[in-house]
Image (spheres, rainbow, N blue to C red):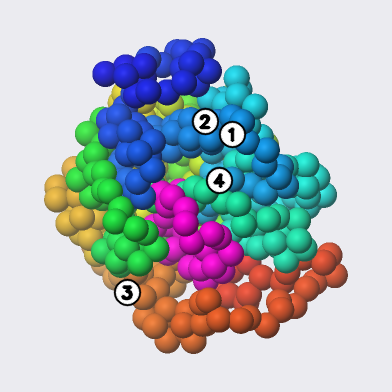
Amino acid sequence: MSFTNLGLRAEILHAIGEQGYDTPTPIQAKAIPLVLEGRDLMASAQTGTGKTAGFTLPILQLLSSRQEGLSLKRFKSRALILTPTRELAVQVQESVRTYGKHLSLRSAAIYGGVGMGPQTKALRAGTDILVATPGRLLDHIQQRNADLSGIEILVLDEADRMLDMGFINDIRKIIALLPKQKQSLLFSATFSDEIRALAAGLMRDPASVDVAPRNAATSLVKHSVYLVDRARKRDLLIQLIENHGWHQILVFARTKHGADALAERLDKAGIRSAALHGNKTQGARQRALEDFKRNKVTVLVATDIAARGIDIDQLPHVINFELPNVPEDYVHRIGRTGRAGTNGEAISLVCIDEHRLLRDIEQLMKKSIEKKVLSGFEPDPSIRPEPIQNGRRSAGAAKAQRKSDPRSRTAGKPQRPQQRGASGRSAPPARKSGGNYAGSRDR
């Protein structure tokens, strides 16, 4: 099958051809026809398989076809794409602009970490396709900069991650402002049973597309584990980089402080590194990502939240300096490599504290991961495991919190106005300290 078989208009096919593509990926081939039919859709596929084009292409087709001969109020957006992070919002809007370059549709990306002025100007000038993070979109809605009453298509990109990150109340507030008659699309690499049940209440007879087994990792990635003591992880990482001459490595740390400390340690060892996490300004995050893409830095140390939106076709190595607390996050992490048909390598540095987490990951993937020990870094059998204090809560803890949190039962009811800070922006709700969540909300 080629893109010409999907019924896309000539302007879109021209833009696709300019990017060097002629054959849709499996998720695109299955999802695009369903979206063009106007169906609600839940689509699951491995990271790096073209999910973004799977919804941007048909949205461009539908909106441009409906636009002809119509006189619409340009102030009202017609499609809303919600993403969990700033980086992913930028990436999605780049896709919209790339494939819609020969159309007259307007788009804008709305996210936190930058001033609201340019975003306000773009919104008031009129935008057909709005890509946004939930918190910043609510800021604009409260200031009457955005009008969602004309939304025809809603997309939740990385839907499971948005809901799991605590955006559920924000998403419900936004959905309450949308027309009841709309097309709803959920795209993600993974869907938990809880998320599927929640989505079922938001959609009308949704079609389902599962290109790969749920929570599966691409077969193009080679997995391995180095067993090491917790205090020697940094030295082992430096040794591995020097031994293999790796030149572009995405390293995952569990916390923002840990990411900063590791990047600083690697820099002192002569390995140019940068940290990427929610406490960085948007400008700093963008510079770190661009320097990494251009090989100006060898190692990018990121937290799970900040790494969403990192899209590098031929990223060779992903290293888990610390394993994630939730096994599904392992799939998201290693999905940064092995993309676009290229091979990749996923390496995890595992200490005694993380053996249970490793077993959970192997159980999820239904496979055993090769264990290695580098000479000189043999684990000390006398060291006892310690509790992992920081990092993301377990799925069970998050579920228990949602059940006990009265705010989760007030969605759709009138809310008191949020307190506003000196800048005029809504003050984010207080969050527990620890891990990637304290003060790191992607508004």
Observer-side mark, 3 or 2, equals 2
Observer-side mark, 3 or 1, equals 1
The residue sitting at 51% across, 82% down in the picture is 410
Instruction: Tell me the residue that label 3 is attached to.
Output: 396
Identify the amino acid type marked 4.
Ala
Q: Secondary structure at mark 1?
A: helix
Which sits earlier in the primary sequence, circle 3 or circle 2? 2
Q: CA distance from mark 4 to mark 1?
A: 13 Å
Instruction: Tell me the residue that label 4 is attached to.
Output: 79
Q: Secondary structure at mark 2?
A: helix
Identify the amino acid type marked 2.
Ser
Observer-side mark, 3 or 4, equals 4
Q: Position of residue 186 (x, y in %)?
A: 39, 51
Residue 243 higher or lower than 278, as above or below: above
**Where is residue 338, by image quadrant?**
top left
Identify the amino acid type marked 3.
Gly
- Residue 304 seen in render: no
Near-viewer residue (298 or 153):
153
Q: CA distance from mark 1 to mark 2?
A: 5 Å
Instruction: Tell me the residue that label 2 is attached to.
Output: 65
Q: Residues within 10 Å of mark 2 (few under 14, many from 20)?
A: few
Labelled pair 2, 4 in contact (Cβ < 8 Å) = no
User: Which label is found at residue 400?
Assistant: none
Stretch of the chain drawn in magenta: 156-185
Near-viewer residue (140 or 183):
183
